[in-house]
Amino acid sequence: MSEQQPQAEQRGRRKVRQGTVVSNKMQKTVVVQVSRQVQHPLYKKVMIRSQRFKAHDELSCDVGDLVEIMETRPLSKEKRWRVTRIIEKVK
């Protein structure tokens, strides 16, 4: 049984991302845009790459809020993330 414990711990780790809410027009779903900086492999210029995730929202986020999302089981066709906390509320 002790051999299976490390596998269970590794399987239990979930991805966590921080991003900005860009849409909250759906019911209990928000669109979160996550941006990251990457360096161009040839020209070495720093570029901003962004990706959008649909996340389940029970905390009623507003557009512009900085939130933390966590990977979860598939909740719908495109929704695989959920909002875990609101880091910064927009005024």
Image: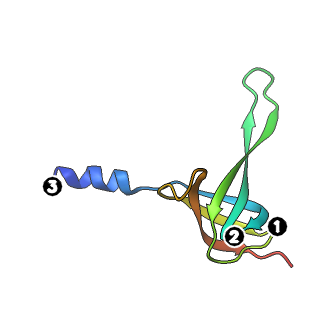
For image coordinates 70% across by 77% down, the residue present is: 60
Question: Which numbered dot is residue 14?
Answer: none
- Depth check, front residue: 43 or 50: 50
- Secondary structure of the residue carrying numbered label 1: loop
Q: What element carries label 2?
A: loop
Does residue 40 sit above or below 73 in this rendering? Answer: above
The residue carrying mark 2 is: 27
Say what amino acid the circle numbered 1 marks: Gly
Query: Mark 2 vs mark 1: which is more N-terminal?
Result: 2
- Amino acid carrying label 3: it is Ser
Quarter occupied by residue 9:
bottom left
Q: Earlier in the sequence, mark 3 or mark 2?
A: 3
Are discs 3 and 2 less than 8 Å apart at CB?
Answer: no
Residue 8 in the image, given as x and y percentages of width and height: 29, 54
What whole-number distance in Å separates the C-alpha atoms at marks 1 and 3?
46 Å
Q: How far apart are marks 2 and 1 (CA)?
A: 17 Å
**Disc number lying in front (2 or 1):** 2
Along the horizontal axis of the image, is 10 left or right of 4? right
The Cα atoms of the two marked residues, 3 and 2, are separated by: 43 Å
1 vs 3, front mark? 1
Q: Which mark is residue 64?
A: 1
What amino acid is found at the position of numbered circle 2 in the picture? Answer: Gln
Which coloring applies here? rainbow
Residues at marks 2 and 1 touching, judged by CB atoms closer than 8 Å: no
Whichever of labels 1 and 3 marks the residue nearer the N terminus, that label is 3
Instruction: Read off the residue under disc 3.
Output: 2
Q: In which quarter of the image is the C terminus?
A: bottom right
Q: Nearer the viewer, mark 3 or mark 2?
A: 2
